């Protein structure tokens, strides 16, 4: 397969995303696999939002945040997956300059939003465990809405900043990106400008956001652990930990992949591993989050059973 390149003295108007072109015989299997994952992710996250809305028992701060987490996961995977599927199916692997920047901006916004949404949920668990009697008062609907709005605004500000930095660079060619999405470091690799400031800005912003998220999460769980240790009965102790188990699992998976992607996989020899880690972060994690939160929750499982039962009755009529 031959990929055209823009003249090195001319600003590029599009980029070529190689995706998984190094495996030409696996294009169809990869397309089918990613298509199934995308469909499952969409159904799970939209289903989780629907279940939370129709079940009054789930109209709590925790599930209010979870519905937004599902919305963010749905949006994030929808930013990445359709173009990846297109790249695997057609020979034209180009993406316009504007489309590439838009994909980066949206993807970055949803990644940062998810990180801080998990931090907000950690604070929610802290209030639920440490101040259970004042939980509904402390986590009022107004406060929950404010926390969510601030999370979206915060993510928008930082993603806008990074996108603006990318737009200030020159892209003279070659315009070939060895990735399946417009990721920050991948775009820097095809820029003909001095990228030292851009790299430093991304590092500072990423470390600041990661540090803020982990500080909120660690602080919240330190107080939770101290409170739980003081609980005399084993039943109460088990219940307190069970309310946090799903959230801790989601945090471990999300931040583990982020740290792996941005702190470990940096060398050119690990480009394939970078792609795999990006697939995991953009498609597998959004697919797993609804399962992580629903498998341990009786109210969610009961709602699903009722919906299935109603569907069976409807079809039998």
Image: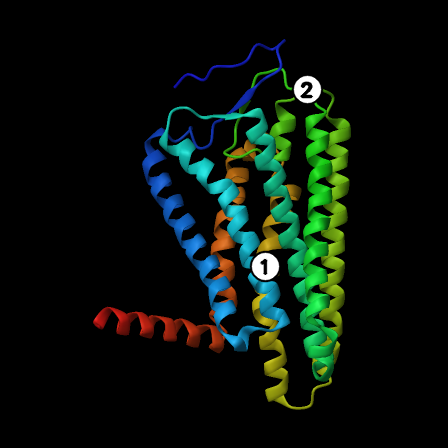
Corner quadrant of residue 262: top right
Q: What residue lies at 55% left-to-right and 13% top-to-bottom?
A: 6
With respect to residue 45, does 300 lie above or below? Answer: below
Q: In this rendering, does residue 248 appear at all?
A: no
Q: Residue furthest front?
A: 317
| Mark 1 or 2, closer to the camera | 1
Q: Position of residue 269 (x, y in %)?
A: 55, 31
Q: Position of residue 251 (x, y in %)?
A: 61, 60
Q: Residues within 10 Å of mark 2 (few under 14, many from 20)?
A: some
Quadrant of the image occupied by residue 67: bottom right
Residue 185: which numbered mark, if any?
Answer: none
* Nearer the observer, 134 or 183: 134
From the image, tell me which residue sits under label 2.
170
Residues under labels 1 and 2: Cα distance? 36 Å
In primary-sequence order, the first of circles 1 and 2 is: 1
Give the residue displayed 27% in from the left and 71% down from the top. Answer: 314
The local secondary structure at tag 2 comes to: loop
The quarter of the image holding the N terminus is: top left
Image point (62%, 48%), residue name: 111
Q: Is residue 105 visible?
A: yes
In this rendered view, identify the residue nearer to me: 71 or 189: 71
Does dot 1 land on a helix, a strand or a loop? Answer: helix
On the image, the x and y values in percent for residue 112 come to: 66, 49
Image spot of residue 59 (x, y percent): 57, 73
What mark, if any, has residue 68 been given in the picture?
1
């Amino acid at each position: 397969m031959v990929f055209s390149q823009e003249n090195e003295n001319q600003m590029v108007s599009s980029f070529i995303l190689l995706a998984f072109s190094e495996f030409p015989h696996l294009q169809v299997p990869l397309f089918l696999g990613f298509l199934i994952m995308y469909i499952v992710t969409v159904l799970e996250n939209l289903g989780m939002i629907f279940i939370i809305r129709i079940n009054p028992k789930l109209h709590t701060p925790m599930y209010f945040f979870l519905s937004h987490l599902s919305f963010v996961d749905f949006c994030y995977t929808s930013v990445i997956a359709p173009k990846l599927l297109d790249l695997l199916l057609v020979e034209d692997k180009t993406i316009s300059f504007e489309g590439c920047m838009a994909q980066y901006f949206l993807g970055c916004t949803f990644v940062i939003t998810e990180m801080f949404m998990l931090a907000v949920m950690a604070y929610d668990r802290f209030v639920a465990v440490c101040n259970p009697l004042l939980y509904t008062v402390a986590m009022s609907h107004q406060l929950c809405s404010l926390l969510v709005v601030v999370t979206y605004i915060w993510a928008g500000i930082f993603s806008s900043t990074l996108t603006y930095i990318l737009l200030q660079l020159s892209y003279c060619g070659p315009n070939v990106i060895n990735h399946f999405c417009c990721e920050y470091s991948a775009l820097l690799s095809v820029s003909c400008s001095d990228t030292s400031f851009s790299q430093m800005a991304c590092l500072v912003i990423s470390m600041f956001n990661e540090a803020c998220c982990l500080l909120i999460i660690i602080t919240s769980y330190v107080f939770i652990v101290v409170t739980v240790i003081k609980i005399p009965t084993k039943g109460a102790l088990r219940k307190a930990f069970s309310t946090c188990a799903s959230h801790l699992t989601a945090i471990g998976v999300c931040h583990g992949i982020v740290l792996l992607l941005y702190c470990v996989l940096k060398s050119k020899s690990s480009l394939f591993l970078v792609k795999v880690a990006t697939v995991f972060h953009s498609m597998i994690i959004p697919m797993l989050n609804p399962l992580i939160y629903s498998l341990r929750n009786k109210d969610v499982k009961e709602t699903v059973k009722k919906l299935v039962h109603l569907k069976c009755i409807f079809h039998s009529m």
